[in-house]
Amino acid sequence: MALEPNENQDRSVTKFESMLKTDDVYFFDAEDFEDIIHHYLNIGKIALGKKAIQIGLKQHPHSLELKLLKVETLVFEDQFDTAEKLLDELQTLDSSNEEIFIQRANILSKQDDHQGAVSMLMQALSVAENSFDIYSLLGMEYLFMDDFEKAKVSFTKCVEFDDTDYASLYNVIYCYEFLEDFDGAILYLNEYLERNPYCQVAWHQLGKMYYAKSMFKEALTAFDFAIISEDSFLGAYFEKGKVLEKLGKYNEAIESYETTINLDDPTSHAYLRIGRCHEKLGNDDLAKYYYYNTVHEDPLLDKGWLAITEYYTKKEDYHKAQRYINKAINIDGENPMYWKKCAKIYMALDNLDEADFAFKQAVDLGNFELDTWQEWAAVLYKLKDYHSASQVLLQGLEFYPENAEMSFQLAGLYIKTNKTLLAKEKLSYALQLNAEKVVDFKEKFPEFKNVKWILDILKRNKKAST
């Protein structure tokens, strides 16, 4: 009975390993050595692969394929100079072997010369009989170069060669996504599905493209077809749940997420989404139950701790909210929104020093939202650190120069710190921006309502506006 290729390989590997355990020397065909070497390289046993190459070249010193496998191991170990010398020798023997150009491309790619790698792969294409693998390598080089248009073309060719090459299909859609050409992706996937109507991967990707365009009904249909094509497709159930959430169908969304838990081990992300659905439905106890399950399943999922933080914030239980936002910050201390949320919680607890520190962290990490500057300045004002409050408002006004509220507040702080000239200038400017906001100014600084020069400025502005 003829052996399948994998049976041949298994038998060759078993025979080779038996040889290594004894002092006997067995003879193998060059093709057998290739199978043995590929086996070891594929499972990451590089030392055994190199041993097989060494013995193989002793038995078959003129085998071009074995020498190319030796090149592959040299490249893997970053021995580029040695690999290049061996490739030079091989090219003199066979100048039309595409594998030589592929290995040269591999070397150039590992040296970050991706344009050079593309040139080599183009030469490989010119001599290759089967270009499928080369187009895949080309696509990856174009991705390294952020040339998503050319990468898309290369991966599309791979799918044309083999409709079941889902890795390339994913890469095609990734390129469309990066180019924000969702319409193009939808057209491509629909054409693909005309040829392969039961491809769950394509239906899943089509659903994600519809979701990105907020076409939720179409997305729901696509995910349903993905599930019809493969009823154990976890990703399709999960994405379907997200669509149902968007459509306000929270009970159906919960069912979809629960299916993922029933089909496989529960995930923290599924628990989190179920918790949010229950919160939307007003099932607070169930929401809390699933949020705690989220962090129990994955204690390092910062979004889980954030969900618990928001839950207790809504309940105005700021002490618990503060405890849980700190857990999120311990996981992702570079997230400015976490620090801002932390600052707001400390404000609610009237812990102004900690709020000041948290706002500073949020700004240092890149949060420049209007209310960040306003609330940080308000904290410093309560701390009676008028100078620092002024500096915060000045920074905020660099981002929002026409914000009257901050200008009025800054004018008041200048008055408090006896910077009368600056106060007059800022008050006049604030009135030009929005005179109606003077009401807030008077409420915030009632002690200045009868100051003569302020009254004069207000009168002048009133006359100028009538």
Image: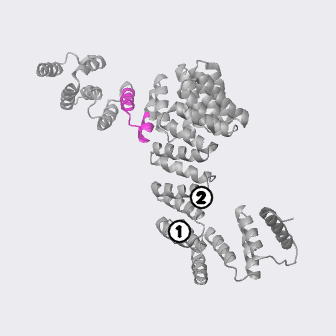
Q: Is residue 437 left or right of residue 356?
A: left
Q: CA distance from mark 1 to mark 2?
A: 18 Å
Q: Nearer the viewer, residue 252 or 128?
A: 128
Mark 2 sits on what residue? 161
When the figure is inspected, residue 96 is found, relative to residue 189, above or below; the finding is: below
Give the extent of the magenta segment: 359-380
Q: Residues within 10 Å of mark 1 (few under 14, many from 20)?
A: many
Q: Main secondary structure of the magenta part?
A: helix
Identify which amino acid the numbered label 2 is placed on.
Answer: Phe
Mark 1 sits on what residue? 121
**Image spot of residue 81 (x, y percent):** 57, 77
Q: First in sequence, mark 1 or 2: give its number.
A: 1
In the figure, residue 222 lies in which quadrant?
A: top right
**Image spot of residue 335 (x, y percent):** 49, 39
Element under disc 1 = helix
Q: Is residue 47 left or right of residue 442?
A: right
Q: Residues within 10 Å of mark 2 (few under 14, many from 20)?
A: some
86 magenta-colored = no
Q: How is the image coloured?
A: one colour
Q: Is residue 355 visible?
A: yes
Q: Residue at position x 59%, y 41% from top? A: 203
